[in-house]
Image: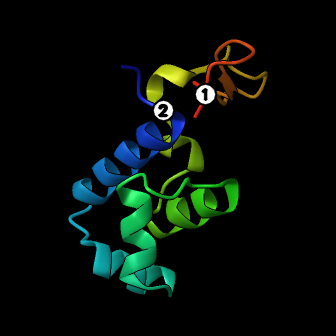
Amino acid sequence: MARTYREAVAEEFRVAMARRGLSQSALARLMRTNQAWVSVRARGEVPINVDDLERLAEALELDPVDLLPKEWVKPSPPAPDGDAVWAPRGSNSQPAD
C-alpha cells in the first residue's frame, strides 16, 4: 500500500527531528505549543497543513520543502543568478489521502 501524503510528511518530520536530536517535548517548547500537538502530527494522525509545515520548518531550522518527501520534489534548472529553485515533479505528484 502506498504512503499517503500525511504519512510521508510525518515521516520526513520525524527524520528531521531525529537528525537534530530533538524530542517531541523539546520541539514543542521551541514552537511554543504542547507535546500533544507535535505528537499527533509526527504520527500522521493529523495532517500537517501549510501553516504547520512552515512552523515546523522554522523550529527545525529548515526550508519547508525539506520536510516534503524527496520523491515529490526535484530541483529545477538553476535560475539565472545561479540559485536552484524547487518545483513540484509533475502536475499531481501527491497521493490522495
Task: Tell me the quarter of the image containing the N terminus.
Answer: top left
For marks 2 and 1 on the same chain, the one whose residue lies earlier in the sequence: 2
**In the foreground, 29 or 94:** 94
Residue 76 placement (x, y as % from top left): 66, 17
Q: Is residue 24 left or right of residue 45?
A: left
Establish if 92 lies above or below 19: above
Question: What sort of colour scheme is used for the picture?
Answer: rainbow
What residue type is disc 1 on? Ala
Q: Tell me the residue at 56%/50% (across/down).
A: 63
Number of numbered discs visible in the structure rendering: 2
Establish if 57 lies above or below 84: below
Residue 61 placement (x, y as % from top left): 46, 62
Residue 71 placement (x, y as % from top left): 47, 20
Residue 52 found in image quarter = bottom right
Label placed on residue 16 = none
Question: Which residue in the structure is indicated by mark 1?
Answer: 96
Q: Tell me the residue at 75%/28% (across/down).
A: 81
Label placed on residue 4 = 2
Q: Dot 2, crowdedness within 10 Å: few (<14), some or many (≥20)?
A: some
Q: Is residue 55 left or right of residue 22?
A: right
Task: Tell me the quarter of the image containing the C terminus.
Answer: top right
What residue type is disc 2 on? Thr
Establish if 57 lies above or below 33: above
Residue 86 found in image quarter = top right
Q: Tell me the residue at 68%/29% (across/down).
A: 85
SS category of the residue bearing label 1: loop
